[in-house]
């Protein structure tokens, strides 16, 4: 398996966690010291991974960097933590 194929599999495993909600799998593919860049903010640490959705940097079979924009509302809906219906204002 090439490095590119391994990286593709890591990203697929990461994306699958949005469906399976398997936090152990998420921890397995996202580095504990992941760097997240998005919306003009750069942060470090696994606790903010859900905010970056565009692209990822990988090293040694783990995601170590994200670039993207925030879609926290979409993530929470996808995880079943918010109702899957429009919000009434």
Image: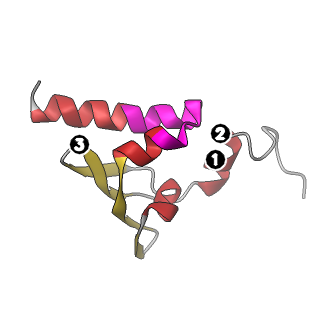
Colouring rule applied to residues: secondary structure
Q: Residue furthest left?
A: 2
Give the magenta range.
13-24
Quadrant of the frame with the C terminus: bottom right
Q: Earlier in the sequence, mark 2 or mark 3?
A: 3
**The stretch drawn in magenta includes residue 30:** no
Q: CA distance from mark 2 to mark 3?
A: 25 Å
Q: Quadrant of residue 12?
A: top left
Asked if marks 2 and 1 touch (Cβ < 8 Å), the reply is yes
Residue drawn where x is 18% and y is 28% of the image: 5
| Residue 78: mark in rendering | 2
Q: Which residue occupies the foreground of this view, 54 or 6?
A: 6
Q: Is residue 61 above or below residue 44?
A: above
Label 3 residue SS: loop
Residue placed under numbered mark 3 in the picture: 61
Q: Specify whether 21 is left or right of 89.
A: left
Q: Is residue 25 above or below residue 46?
A: above
Mark 2 → mark 1, Cα distance in angstroms: 6 Å
Q: Residue 74's mark? A: 1
Instruction: Please say if the residues under marks 1 and 3 sit with CB atoms less than 8 Å apart.
Output: no
- Of residues 40 and 59, the one nearer the viewer is 59
**Mark 2 or mark 1, which is nearer to you?**
2
- Place of residue 31 in the rendered image (x, y in percent of width and height, measured from the top left): 33, 55
Tag 3 or tag 1, which sits nearer the N-term?
A: 3
Residue pictured at 45% horizontal, 56% vertical = 52
Q: Nearer the viewer, residue 76 or 63?
A: 63
Q: Residue furthest front?
A: 24
Q: Quadrant of residue 35?
A: bottom left
Asked which secondary structure carries label 2, the reply is helix
- Identify the element where label 1 is drawn: helix
Q: Nearer the viewer, mark 1 or mark 3?
A: 3
């Amino acid at each position: 398996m090439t490095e590119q194929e391994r990286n593709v599999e890591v990203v697929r495993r990461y994306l699958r966690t949005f469906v399976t909600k398997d936090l152990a799998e998420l921890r397995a593919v996202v580095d504990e010291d992941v760097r997240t860049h998005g919306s003009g903010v750069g942060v470090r640490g696994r606790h903010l991974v859900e905010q970056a959705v565009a692209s990822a940097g990988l090293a040694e079979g783990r995601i170590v960097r994200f670039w993207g924009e925030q879609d926290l509302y979409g993530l929470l809906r996808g995880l079943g933590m918010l109702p899957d219906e429009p919000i009434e204002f």
